């Protein structure tokens, strides 16, 4: 019996010795700084009398930890609480580091900059505060940076923009301020900085033409974006809403394979000349300063918000036809300077379609329900319409 016990002890020690001592101690420190939230049992397998490479969320190659996924991966799990220990930076072979949604607080360890093999960094939907370490710019192999839905403040470090292999940058829903630095990676496809406090303008070459997903909504960004957008010809998602962008919009934007184009609540100006028939199903241009006549090339849009602009002239007849045939589901044109629409007053708007025309320079030929925010006035004051009629 004694021999069996001795053999078992030797095997246990060999098993523990499989992991490099520095990585072993780092995991111990990480464990001490984090805890399971109620109904979570992620750390249940973290028994340091056994091989740490068999712990939940720990993946090894040889004697080194190459991936660390902290938290229970099951959907709806309550996650972890505590802080991220700086010892994470001692896992020198780490290529992937993630933390599932939970209540982890404190700042991102500066020691993350030591992880020169890191390819994936995902710490989202927690309560991480403080600034983004500028040292992350040393992670030259990093491909995905996801720090979304936290409480990060300060600037987006310009050093991050120099990383050559980045494919995904997701920093949305934080409290980041300052300007958006240029990003040089020609592999970058997803760029999401919505719901922050970013300001300043975007340079024409600040983002690579490889982008497919761009969301900058709910910030305080300013300046023109026409030349930048003209370069981004691979976009399949674009949301620039709720900023202070100015200038005009390139006509080729409306030919991109985008499902939902959101440019509302900015300071865009000028007429809009789409290059060919608009192929985007949902277009929101509302609450800007667009002017000129409405192009009939927008008649193929299913949901079209052009309200609260400075459009003039007649509503294109083809739009009316497509609305009455229920091919246009929403056509909001209120609060412009439109002078007419060729529609029979007895025409019946399909039940599943919505038309709003009020507060334009016309007597409404049909009475249709409008959103409450459109107000109660049916037409613009004549004095306002005289000036814009000449411009139209």
Image (cartoon, rainbow, N blue to C red):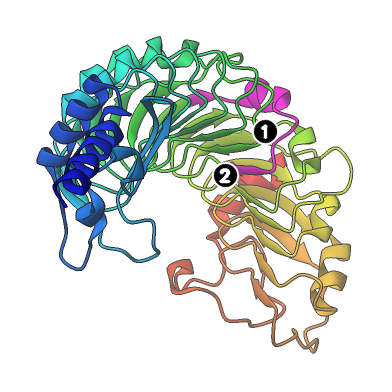
Q: Which residue is mark 2?
A: 263
Q: Residue 303 versus residue 348: which sits nearer the camera? A: 303
Q: Who's the residue at 79% across and 34% down the image?
A: 252
Q: Residue 172 versus residue 16: which sits nearer the camera? A: 16
> Quadrant of the rendered structure where residue 354 is?
bottom right
Gap in Å between the C-alphas at discs 2 and 1? 10 Å
Q: Who's the residue at 43% across and 35% down the image?
A: 193
Q: Please say if 219 is above or below 324.
A: above
Query: Helix or strand or loop: what does disc 1 sit on?
Result: loop
Tag of residue 249: 1
Q: How many marks?
A: 2
Circles 2 and 1: CB atoms closer than 8 Å: yes
Q: Is residue 158 visible?
A: no
Quarter of the image with the C terminus is top right
Crowding at label 1, few (<14), some or many (≥20) Cα neighbours within 10 Å?
many
Based on the picture, tell me whether residue 390 belongs to the magenta stretch.
no
> Quadrant of the rendered structure where residue 106 is?
top left
Residue 149 pos. (x, y %)? 32, 46
Crowding at label 2, few (<14), some or many (≥20) Cα neighbours within 10 Å?
many
Q: Magenta segment range?
A: 223-238
């Amino acid at each position: 019996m004694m021999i069996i016990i001795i053999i078992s002890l030797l095997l246990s020690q060999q098993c523990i010795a499989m992991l490099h001592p520095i990585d072993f101690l780092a995991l111990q420190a990480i464990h001490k700084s984090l805890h399971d939230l109620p109904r979570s049992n992620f750390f249940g397998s973290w028994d340091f009398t056994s091989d740490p490479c068999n712990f939940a969320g720990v993946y090894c190659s040889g004697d080194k930890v190459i991936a660390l996924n902290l938290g229970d991966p099951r959907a709806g799990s309550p996650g972890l609480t505590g802080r991220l220990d700086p010892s994470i930076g001692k896992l020198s072979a780490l290529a992937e580091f993630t933390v599932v949604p939970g209540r982890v607080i404190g700042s991102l360890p500066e020691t993350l900059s030591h992880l020169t093999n890191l390819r994936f960094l995902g710490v989202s939907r927690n309560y991480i505060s403080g600034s983004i370490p500028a040292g992350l710019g040393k992670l030259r192999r990093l491909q995905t940076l996801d720090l979304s839905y936290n409480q990060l403040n300060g600037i987006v470090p310009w050093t991050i923009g120099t990383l050559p292999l980045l494919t995904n940058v997701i920093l949305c829903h934080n409290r980041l301020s300052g300007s958006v630095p240029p990003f040089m990676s020609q592999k970058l496809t997803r760029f999401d900085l919505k719901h922050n406090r970013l300001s300043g303008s975007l340079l024409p070459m600040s983002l690579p033409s490889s982008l497919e997903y761009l969301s900058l909504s709910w910030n305080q960004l300013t300046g023109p974006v026409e030349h930048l957008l003209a370069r981004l010809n691979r976009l399949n998602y674009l949301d620039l809403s709720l900023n202070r962008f100015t200038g005009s919009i390139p006509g080729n934007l409306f030919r991109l394979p985008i499902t939902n184009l959101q440019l509302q609540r900015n300071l865009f100006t000028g007429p809009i000349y789409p290059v060919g028939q608009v192929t985007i199903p949902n277009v929101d241009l509302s609450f800007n300063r667009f002017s000129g006549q409405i192009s009939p090339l927008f008649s193929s849009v299913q949901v079209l918000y052009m309200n609260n602009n400075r459009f003039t002239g007649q509503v294109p007849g083809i739009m009316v036809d497509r609305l009455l045939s229920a091919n246009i589901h929403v056509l909001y044109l209120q609060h412009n300077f439109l002078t007419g629409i060729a529609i029979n007053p007895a025409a019946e708007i399909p039940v599943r379609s919505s038309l709003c025309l009020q507060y334009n320079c016309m007597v409404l030929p049909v009475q249709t329900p409008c959103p409450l925010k459109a107000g109660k006035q049916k037409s613009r004051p004549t004095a306002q319409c005289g000036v814009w009629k000449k411009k139209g």
